[in-house]
Amino acid sequence: MRIIFYFLIAGIAAIVTYALALLVLKLSLKYRLYPQVRQRDVHTRPTPRLGGVAMFFGVVAAFAVASSFSNFSLIFNEPGKVFGLLGAALIIVVIGVADDIWDLDWLTKLAGQIIAAGVLAWQGVQLSTLPIGGKTIVSPYVSLIITIFAIVLVMNAVNFIDGLDGLVAGVAIIASSVFFVYAYLLQGQAQTEYFNLASLTTAILIGACVGFLPANFHPAKMFMGDAGALLVGLLMAASAISVTGQVDDNYLAQPDKFTLSFLPAFIPILLPIAVLVIPLLDFGLAIIRRLRAGKSPFTADRKHLHHRLLDMGHSHLHAVLILYSWTFLASVGVLAFTFVPWRWGALMFVAGLVGCAAVTLAPLSRSKSREAAVQRAAVADDSPVEDARYDGLDAASNEISTTHDTTTHDTKEHTE
């Protein structure tokens, strides 16, 4: 079965990433290649943040091994898109490492991201069509601009949520696993270079994140840094564009050619958004918040979704798991419409929505209960028993206070 080869390639990416992560961690600690803790950071001790380097070489190794398998010959017969993807990844990792070490200004980082996205689009990974109706985008120039914008948007959205241990890696694993299922099903019905590239890229990304997660899960020994977060965003964007920009809606609408029981025409657009719902939501809220405050959209703050969950009373681990749950709900909820009638899909989605909302808002409910209990105690009836109890407490408190004052006074006199 073809899927075995994807598991094999993902396993190679995981093993190489894990081994190199240990090496990078050791070198980072030895040569103190880590920044000081910033005010907005959640962690309290300096932590190496060059995990993206290990992930990059894990991705490169997996692509190199995949090129030797005939099952992926459709991708590597014309390797321009793979070279474009790896070239863009290299640019992003270099920019990310430089930022993790020297803290580059936002304009330099944005320029590097645009160059990387341009390299990827120039090699043919572009949004050339819109899935609904198979409409062709107006012109190659417009296609190029939209593609670059989409890639830069996704990279920054993923980078914005990189604030808790294991958050980006876990969200990427969940979202990419769902997207892999979709791309693999498309590939089974239409053997095209784009669907194969999307499946392979997604499998390699899953493997790299799985290999890095042991070093990054709470309490994290190492962070992936901007290099890793931007790399994850780049690979997720490339996979989504490879599918969304090439799907022919007229083809998918023919039930005799597609074996799934139900596939709405809007799935190719909704699924990429669903798997990126947490990063995109956090990114959008951050941009609006900063612009309203008269600040640059890239000004760092401590008001991201994960910060708000911590402020609500969730623990570090619980906040991460909650964001995992929302990602799972959005991505699996949309994909479910390809397998079940829309009524059942909507029912499952609503049930999941209620469950996730209840878990997310639980600390607020507990806080309101505590406040209500305090208020009830404050307005309680002053019964004789209560008065006696409080009088006793007051007397004991006065006695302790008097004893403390006497002891302090005696101590001062003895010292003088």
Image (cartoon, helix red, strand yellow):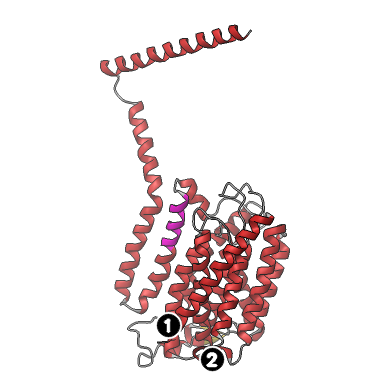
Q: Which label number is shown at residue 350?
A: none
Quadrant where the N terminus sits is bottom left
Of residues 357 and 232, the one drawn nearer to the viewer in this rendering: 232
Task: Identify the residue under disc 1.
Answer: 4
Instruction: Please say if the residues under marks 1 and 2 sit with CB atoms less than 8 Å apart.
Output: no
Q: Is residue 51 left or right of residue 398?
A: right
Identify the main secondary structure in magenta: helix
Q: Position of residue 134 (x, y in %)?
A: 50, 87
Residue range of the region highlighted in magenta in the rendering: 316-326
Q: Which label number is shown at residue 73?
A: 2
Quadrant where the C terminus sits is top right
Q: Position of residue 14 (x, y in %)?
A: 51, 71
* SS at circle 1: helix
Query: Which residue: 38% across, 89% down?
Result: 258
Query: Which residue: 46% across, 13% down?
Result: 401
Q: Is residue 386 left or right of residue 308?
A: left
Q: Is residue 161 above or below residue 134?
A: above
**Alpha carbon of mark 1 to alpha carbon of mark 2: how far?**
16 Å
For the residue marked with disc 1, what is the amino acid? Ile
> Which numbered disc flags the more N-terminal residue, 1 or 2?
1
Query: Which residue: 69% across, 56% down?
Result: 31
- Which tag is nearer the camera, tag 1 or tag 2? 1
Of residues 321 and 307, the one drawn nearer to the viewer in this rendering: 321
Say if the magenta span includes residue 317. Answer: yes
Q: Is residue 287 above or below residue 410?
A: below
* Residue 317 showing in the rendered view: yes
* SS at circle 2: helix
